[in-house]
Amino acid sequence: MHLLFAFAIAIVAGCSLYLILSRHIVRILLGVTMLSAAINLVIFLSGRIVTNVPAVIRAGESSLSADAANPLPQALVLTAIVIGFSLTAFFAALALQTYRSLGSVDTRHIDAAERLGSPFPAAKDRP
Amino acid sequence: MLAALLVSFLGAILARFVVSRTFPHGGWVAALLPAGLFLFFLAKGASLPEVGAITETLEWVPALGISLTLRLDGFALLFVLLITGIGTLVTIYAGAYFAHSPKEEAARFLTLILLFMTAMLGTVLSDNLIVMFVFWEATSLLSFMLIGFNSHRAQARKAALQSLIVTGGGGLALFGGILLIGMTLGTFSLSEVAQRATELLASPLAVPAMILIMLGAFTKSAQLPFHFWLPQAMEAPAPASAFLHSATMVKLGVYLLARFDLIFEGIPAFGATLVIVGSLTMLVAAVRALSTDGFKEVLAHSTVGSLGVLVMLIGLDGDYSVTALIAFIIAHALYKAALFFCAGTTIHAVGEGRLSKIGGLARRLPMTTLAAGMAAISMAGLPPTLGFITKEYLFESQLNASSGWVVVAVAVLVNAVFAAIAGVAAIRPYYLGKTRSEVKHPETLGLYLGPLVLGGLGFLFGLAPDFLVRGLIQPANDVLVGHTVDLSFSLWHGFTPMLALSATVVAFAGGLIAYWHRIHYALSLNKGLARVLGDFGFNAAFAGLLRLAERCTRLLQNGDQHRYTSTVAAAVLLIIGYGVLASGTRPVIALTDGRFDMPSVIVLLLMCLGAFAATRTPSLLRAMIAVGVVGFGSALIFLLNGAPDVALTQFSVEVLLVLILVALLLRVPERAASTREPREKRLDILISAGFALVVFVALAATVALPLDGRISDFYAATSYLEAHGRNVVNVVLVDYRAIDTLGEVIVVAFAAMSVWGLLRIMPRRRAAP
């Protein structure tokens, strides 16, 4: 089962990178979103996925039973989900604002920092 | 001696204020510092014969075996007296030289000169190699500042940079050599290294260390193929040229080689390399000197040649070579500094640096003419000067060595060129020439005192060498030979082979002077020769480096975000792949649990399909839905595998994401054509597949390892007892890791504020490209 998890996570991660490599900003955004989902599963898997018993201490007992799930990766994934969401939201706002000001979501048209094809400023822009 | 070094440094700093206060007589005041140091070291030196060597130590970085150890022995004394003695005259001369300049400029120049003197003293006095290296680099840096002193001249800036690159690069090599020696012997003390030379030579690191140290010395002393920077350095004001680029700094390489000669003499290649490099440098310098017209440049080329002589002398075996070396160091410092002084005064006086344009100055600059004449006689090696005696010793050591007649022939030829240069430099500007040059700045006492003293000393030491031999040459000789040798210097050796060689030199030189114009004209027509012998190689290498940097920048930073991302991703993959292959361990892939959970498998399959669909569809809405499938799928995975809290959070986040993305897609065109060429797509698929492979292998290898459950066990055991919570995940988040959770909340708040701040502004739409 672990290998199946690993395989599926790898497929999702690979597809995410393919999206991130695009020049379309919304595709990059979708790639980042999907990659964070994949990474959450990486953390989850690293704590081993062996049971479906939640990490809750039963009434009358004072410690977690041995068959319960590993609580540590769950806590880390919870934090990661929220941070990933914040990143996506900020990215989406940035993408929207880019479209508003440039009329394009193609990174080839975002060239305020450097001209496409050359890092050297054009002769007319040189100081 | 430590105190003397400190006084020298503080005095250099103070000089800035003192000189501008006492302008235009600041040179005389500032000269008190080097003069005082000269007397101090003279007194120290007088006690040397009884004690052998004086050592003072101050712990600096004891943990690294670096202590500020100063050691004054006979050879160091020779250099110390040269540095402070000529330093005194340079300071006086510089004060007079800058008398017509703004006083700030004079103050700045004298400060640099005195700082340089301090660094020089430190270099030759240090017994610890690391300390010596620090001072060595300081001299390179100050040389850079002095060459570029007239920083408004582009040529000066270029020359300064060139010298810094060459000597700084050589400094790095030297540092490498020092570290190799330190690694082998476990000490950086020069005197200890010298004692344990056989131990060093037995090590395989001895030859690399020798090569690195030779590189450092060759760059500093302008030996082939690094000879080009010294003539360029003539952009420096004349006092700096006299001090740094003839009398002292460029001899540091010679100093270093002489010190290491005792250590490396067991390696036969050491001496042979020195003889070959020194001889070639002599030849190249002689040819270039004959094809040059600039007064200072001619002297500079002859300095390069003289340094070649010194390097060759270190490499020679047999008797007398050490004696000739020491005597030549002294003689050369005396006459070459004097000639640079005269050149500076002459150029300063007429505002013209080309020998062919200056003439008939004997009446206007009588004292300078006299000094130049005296120095030139010594340089030409005519009796009764020190130059004559050293040349006899030079020929004698060559005839005694096993290096053969070629070296002798080179020496005769080059000495003839030197003698001719001496003749031209002393006669042409003062007696010959059709034009009688106008004198703007007449000579003053400060300007002619230095060259007169130095030129006079050349005669004095020639006529009465006993004093010099007992005081300086004998102690230095003993240090470099390793035992006491009885020396006797005399002006007249009798009719010997050396005298015959000297006569040949003089005859040759006479011919060269007579045909100076024609030779000069013929050589200057040959532009290819000048290019090959000059800094052509350096410039080509420098320009090539810049072109390479530009090409790399064009390739890597070409403004295309796709290329940036793919470069980073590909680099990460290559590094990881290399790391895995180089480590030699094979990642383990094994079935670690026998469990099979059908619902999870179905969800995973759906997620994979969603991920593929997201990459394939041209519709952004469909891509968003596909990404949503992956997100909701991961929530289901959490739900099915004992993580309901995580699943709940993931569900709510997915809903919010859908809202945000739909809001975005309402504005942005929904259908998006591909932004990649087919070729780029193929490459991206390759990179992504590689990434997927890395993720899979890493995860499979991770789950194959035993799980370290100590932290989880701690939470499981203490959650209820200490934090009174049954839901362990919740307890971890709000209790054990509460600060992290607070940080997470702050991140969300910041993201919200940033989004609000971004969207608040309605930008003016730029024309769509």
Image (cartoon, coloured by chain):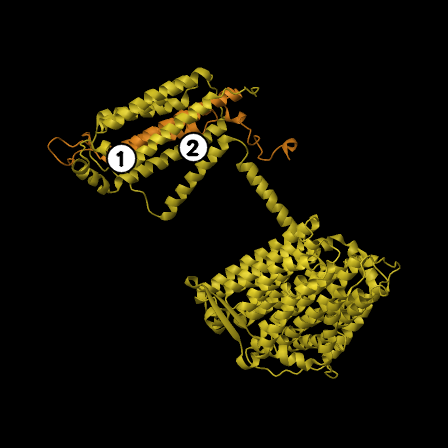
Residue wearing tag 2: B686
B647 displayed left or right of B86: left
Furthest residue toward front: B21
Q: Quadrant of residue B502?
A: bottom right
Which residue occupies the extreme left position in the image?
A60
Residue type, label 2: Leu
Residue closest to the eye, B374 or B260: B374
- The front one of B293 and B274 is B293
Where, by quadrant of the figure, is residue B82 drawn?
Answer: bottom right
Return the chain for callout 1.
A
Residue under circle 1?
Answer: A73
Q: Amino acid at mark 1?
A: Pro
Chain B shown in which color?
A: yellow
Place of residue B3 in the rendered image (x, y in percent of width and height, measured from the top left):
54, 68
Count of number-bearing discs: 2
Residue B579: give x, y in percent of width and height.
39, 45
Look at the image and tell me whether residue B670 can be seen: no
Please, is residue A18 above or below residue B265 in the view? above
